[in-house]
Amino acid sequence: MKVLRYTQAMVDEFVRAGYWTNKTFYDSYDRNARELPDQEALVDSQHRVTWREARDLVDAIATGWVEAGIPKSARIVIQAPNSVYGFLARAAAERAGLISMTAFATLRQNELEDILEKTQAEVAVIPAVFRGFDYLAMYRDLMVRFPSLRRLYLFDDVVPDNAPDGTKSLTRTAHHYLGRIDRATLNKRRFDPFLDVALLTTTSGTTGLPKLVEWPLAPRVCTSKGRIDLWALTKDDVTMAIAPHAGGAAGTLTYFAAPLCGAKTVMLEDFNPEVALQTMAREKVTAIGVVPTHLVRMLEKNVEAYDLSSLRFIRSAGGYLSPQLAREAEARFGAVITSDLGTQDKGSVSGCRVSDPGELRRLTVGQMLPGNEVRLLGEDGQIVPPNEPGVLWFRGPHSPAGYYRDPVMTAEVFDADGWCTTEDVVKFDQGCLWILGRQKDVIIRGGQNIYPAEVEGLMNEHPSVAAVAVVAMPDAEYGERACAFVVLRQGQSLALEALKDFLSSKKVAKFKWPERLECIDVMPTVGDSGKVDKKALRTQLTATAQFA
């Protein structure tokens, strides 16, 4: 299946410049199996496999799928918690020439129906039960509605009696085919890294059902190499997926980047802050992938009781990480925080080096990734003067091929030359991107722009604030005013007047101050992504507040 957006001219451009190569992620498994055969590759609470074992298991699973008659470019949904076999299934899909769609474990029938309808997936790889939820029952119903979905593979060793006919154990399939690997056939099913659709990802779904995004392998490999350079990642590192590997926060570090340099990956199947800290100490983890919520919950524990001396850096993504929380995490974990910018449907934009000064790592999203071009545009569509804020537009070798089989939507987002916008309002300073807010989230109060990220950054320095989100509320006089939703630190309180006094002490313009304060127990997020769901906050505000 050929990609929608990339043309041969674009491929030639990025290949000539050295950003794209013909390497795949499976190539890294194969190389590591030869060069680091006995080094551990993947670890979870049940399994530990070396690079040679990982490569052979990937080949065995892929062989089993080919012999089952699954055609090349068939779509396969992998709804996997963090696990060794979740990773192996993703790599095996690539090896077998199957287009994999890795779904968050939190997705349910409504979202999956949309995915299955769009992809006509033939195969799903799932747990029978996870976190008390019966996935097998859900997929049994989905198979009735979507006849294209004909095969289920379970991460479990034993297939329950009530499973649909033909359901197989992925682990048993892997071991059954270990002695029957057909590498010659698998080699013939190799994806073209430039023009074949190999991967599907989903957006976070903040505006409705998640959108499907199609990727060839070349831009994913390109971004992974860029991240490896920023993080100084090597074969001696031990990465850990604390956030779900289906998303970027942990997936970029562990599934995509780690194999390219031979680093080991440890998987935390279900987040528990104390288990996470214990695992980090036991496995001598050097890098973790988290969303900010994970850091908050771990910092509530006695971090100092665990030997985390091996930890080098923390990759936080998927949501806003306040400078205050970043400083606390760096001090208590003894590791540096690194941030970056990217989206599932537009691609990767920028990133901080682990060696950057603390202020830049905590307050910016770093420098543009190699090959990315950037423009900052004003409301008139013209490039803004130097040092002025503007809406971020970029193009480069780190972007996907568009929305899955949807040329109309793809053309609405990417122009003919490949330019697109993240819709972030940003500024350049000290060579780095500083995010001021989302274009759609900018609050216009009486003709003056309030950038929520700026106000949130200041409010996060208040000792009572654990998390904050600033959203617009309608106002008859000014059009919009700012409302701050705050999660308080344990045992703390905060009143609106005290908040205003605090912002006054920060010398910030008065028109930017929130004029309503809502203290809530938990900040709503979009699934497992960690992103604050500002749409939900605005809906809550509309439902509860009486506006002038």
Image (tube, rainbow, N blue to C red):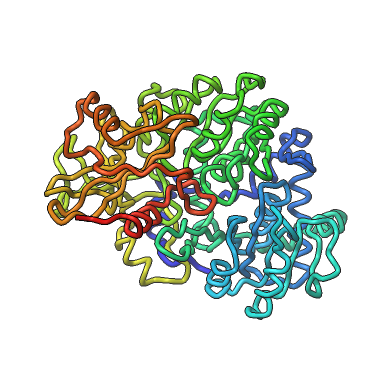
Please tell me in which quadrant of the rendered image residue 89 appears: bottom right
Q: Is residue 261 above or below residue 392?
A: above
Question: Where's residue 200, x and y in %?
Answer: 54, 61
Query: Is 84 in front, or is 181?
Result: 84
Question: Where's residue 135, x and y in %?
Answer: 70, 63
Query: Is 222 in front, or is 522?
Result: 522
Q: Is residue 247 above or below residue 354?
A: below
Q: For the point 70% across and 47% down, which residue is it?
A: 83
Please tell me in which quadrant of the rendered image residue 390 appears: top left
348 relative to 124 in the view: left or right = left
Please tell me in which quadrant of the rendered image residue 300 appears: top right
Tell me if I can see residue 393 in this picture.
no
493 relative to 334 in the view: left or right = left
Q: Is residue 473 above or below residue 309?
A: below
Quadrant showing the N terminus? bottom right
Tell me if I can see residue 79 in this picture.
yes
Q: For the point 41% across and 61% down, which residue is it?
A: 6
